[in-house]
Amino acid sequence: MREKEAVIDPATPVTETIGSGPFTFNKAEWVPGAKVVYDKNKDYVPRLEPVSGNAGGKVIKIDRLQYVIIPDPATQVGAIGRGEVDMLDAPSLDLIPILTKQQDVVVGEIFPLGFYGVIRPNALHPPFNNVKARQALALMVDQKEHATAAYGDPKFWRECYSFWICGGPNGSEAGSEAYRKPNLERARRLLAESGYKGEKIIVISGTDQPIYHALTQVTVERMKQIGFNVDLQAMDWGSVTTRRAKKDAPEAGGWHIFHTTTGAAPMASPLTSVVTSLTCWSSP
């Protein structure tokens, strides 16, 4: 981040997009929701060290990077098969067998730690400003049911009860025993103790993100089982990302819950995890 953005109030949105350093953002060719273009930054000088994940020297070997947004999974597969795109990120899992049969297409794994699934409750407003309501959510979850609905074949997913990611340097599952199997009876009890009285709970979901929407549908059914009065509001993912930034009360255009995922690598450390609160830390 440049200094002029870094010194402003953190609650003030950054309005100018310039790129990432190695690349510059091509604003003239940007088509919101359809295409994003980056050009090689000819003035960028990479660090003289080997690349290591998100660190190290970034040697750019292409002059132009074009990110094309194709919502329909079948159209995505057709595009890569015809050579219209060079890489397909996170293809629909049920279409992978088709991709593996295409002669010039290589299907592979980029992130060995995978992605971390998230049910995000809004802790600013009732009932999830009460920790007991959030614990009720955790106790209703069945990772197998969620993952099977979203990812299908078990070869594409695994259960994990480590807050700092299984397979990472901090990947301990110690202390998670109470949450490894759903306990709907205890979840109902905690929900009642949280003060929840049957108010409408707004769950927002992007139907153009099949994995997120599948996770959401499982969550909605399980929420109903423990006593939540759920209002599932389906929309496109762009609308979800806009709405989730709102701090308004749910009944005033805000929200209670949404599903998402995040890359597991930055979640593997308490210093880089986006769900870690550092507000209670102090320096010696």
Image: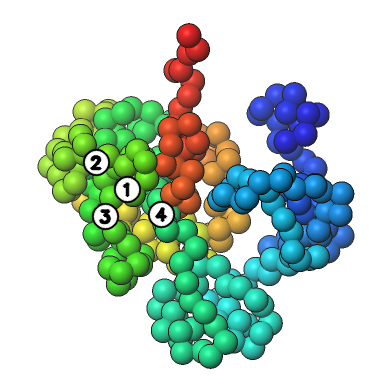
Secondary structure found at label 1: loop
Q: CA distance from mark 2 to mark 1?
A: 8 Å
User: Could you tell me if residue 198 is visible in this image?
Assistant: no
First-in-chain label (1 vs 4): 4
First-in-chain label (2 vs 1): 1
Q: CA distance from mark 2 to mark 4?
A: 16 Å
Name the residue: 41% across, 42% down. Answer: 268
Query: Do the residues bearing badges 2 and 3 touch, measured as CB atoms within 8 Å?
Result: no
Type of the residue with mark 3: Glu
Q: Nearer the viewer, mark 1 or mark 3?
A: 1
User: Could you tell me if residue 87 is visible in this image?
Assistant: yes
Query: Do the residues bearing badges 2 and 1 touch, measured as CB atoms within 8 Å?
Result: yes
Type of the residue with mark 2: Glu
Q: Is residue 40 left or right of residue 58?
A: right
The one of 114 and 226 positioned closer to us in this rendering: 114
First-in-chain label (2 vs 4): 4
Q: Quadrant of residue 170?
A: top left
Secondary structure found at label 2: loop
Q: CA distance from mark 1 to mark 4?
A: 8 Å
**Dot 3 alpha-carbon crowd within 10 angstroms: few under 14, some 14 to 19, many 20 or more:** few
Residue annotated with mark 4: 113
Residue 271 placed where, x, y %? 48, 31
Q: Which mark is residue 166?
A: 1
Q: Is residue 54 left or right of residue 97?
A: right
Count the labels in the image: 4
Q: Which mark is residue 159?
A: 3
Secondary structure found at label 4: loop
Q: CA distance from mark 3 to mark 4?
A: 12 Å
Q: Which mark is residue 173?
A: 2
Residue 28 placed where, x, y %? 87, 60
